[in-house]
Image (cartoon, rainbow, N blue to C red):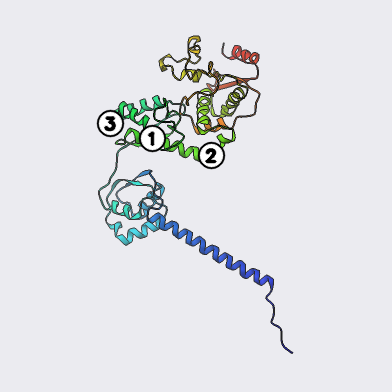
Amino acid sequence: MGTRGKKKSPVKLIVVLSVLAVILALILAAVIYLNNILDDINGGHLTDETAVVEVVSGDTTAVIADKLEAAGVIQYPAVFRFMAGMEGVDTNLHIGKYEFAKGEKYEAILYALKQAPNYRASVRITFTEGMEVSDVIAKFLAVGAENEARWTSVGFEAALRHDYGYSYIPAADVANRLEGFLYPDTYDFFLDATETELFAKMIANFNQKATVAGLEAKAAARNMTLYEALTLGSIIQKEAGKVADFNMVSSVFHNRLRDDWLLQSDAAVSYPIPKEERLPSCTYEQLNTDTPYNVYMHKGLTPTPICNPSIDAAVAACEPAESDYFYFIGYVDATTGEQITVFAKTMKEHQANIDKYLK
């Protein structure tokens, strides 16, 4: 009689296949990891951003590699140290400040470290939420004058008309076209940068913040464009006392837009008024002056943003709280100094709040 071959156990087959799958996954992960290393070495992660790295006396190649990683110039300090050793750079380093592009080729970095430093003087400037483009330019000019930068009003006028490559920015001939896009933040600017490069850095920051927040998608979910969200966000930024009030203030404006009411924002009316003539509440004459920004006379949003808002305000424009409020007032608590916003559903309630808190 013949003998039958033993069938492989299904359990053993599953184990073998599982082991093979794990091995293949590990090989794939290793290949991806090695490709990422090679990309980093060869400048595959190069960006337009730069970083300044300072080499001081006593710095070893290991210390410099860690500084480069912390600055976002490289991703793999151990690989950089190995290449530096192979190149002999660790025995021929110059102290000083070096400017590198983030994602720069390792070869280019090593070459630069053997040369004289290429440092460019810079200055740190903070722009706060709600500043207008005119405020931003004024601050640039003031800081530039203190630091011998060659920034001029004429240069900024040209920068206002420059094409920055973003489809959501209005055309060059549109008044106030960059309002809303000069993102409020703290920046390090090179003193020899052009006025256009200064704006480009701020606009790139806005684009990055908007992308991470998913602002365009959030706006679309509310049947708004990104520009409309930014415009309403700028009004919220000016009108709300604090971030905690953004969504509720947004609900008031959305309720008014939904019911075809006037927005009636004093901040919007004030935008075209010279700053020295602006008041916390607009005068009767100002409210009755017909401009595209007078939302006591014209329904809908203003033609452009009225300031450069935070991303929180722009997102709040897309995500209003659920409420039946149509009115609000703001006042400063005399005891705590806190900005307080009080909401109302009806004109009667609103007038009562005015009588209680503002008189």
Location of residue 78 (image quadrant):
bottom left
Q: Residues within 10 Å of mark 2 (few under 14, many from 20)?
A: few
Tag in front: 2 or 1: 1
The amino acid beneath tag 1 is Asp
Q: Work out whether mark 2 precedes mark 1 in sequence or the reverse, and give the earlier one.
A: 1
Circle 3 is placed at which residue position?
150
Q: Is residue 316 left or right of residue 6?
A: left
The amino acid beneath tag 2 is Gly
Q: Is residue 94 left or right of residue 49?
A: left
Depth check: 22 or 70 in front? Answer: 22
The amino acid beneath tag 3 is Arg
Q: Residues within 10 Å of mark 3 (few under 14, many from 20)?
A: some
User: What is the x, y in percent for residue 284?
Assistant: 50, 9
Label ID, residue 214? 2
Disc 2 on helix, strand or loop?
loop
Q: Is residue 267 left or right of residue 58?
A: right
Quadrant containing the N terminus is bottom right
Depth check: 66 or 268 in front? Answer: 268
Q: Work out whether mark 3 precedes mark 2 in sequence or the reverse, and give the earlier one.
A: 3
Q: Is residue 222 left or right of residue 49?
A: right
Q: Residues within 10 Å of mark 1 (few under 14, many from 20)?
A: some
Q: CA distance from mark 3 to mark 2?
A: 37 Å
Name which residue lies at 46% across and 38% down: 207
Q: Are marks 3 and 2 in contact (CB under 8 Å)?
A: no
User: What is the x, y in percent for residue 209?
Assistant: 48, 38
Quadrant containing the C terminus is top right
Q: Work out whether mark 3 precedes mark 1 in sequence or the reverse, and give the earlier one.
A: 3
Above or below residue 296? Residue 305 is below
Circle 1 is placed at which residue position?
163
Depth check: 90 or 26 in front? Answer: 26
Label ID, residue 12? none
Q: Residue furthest bottom?
A: 1
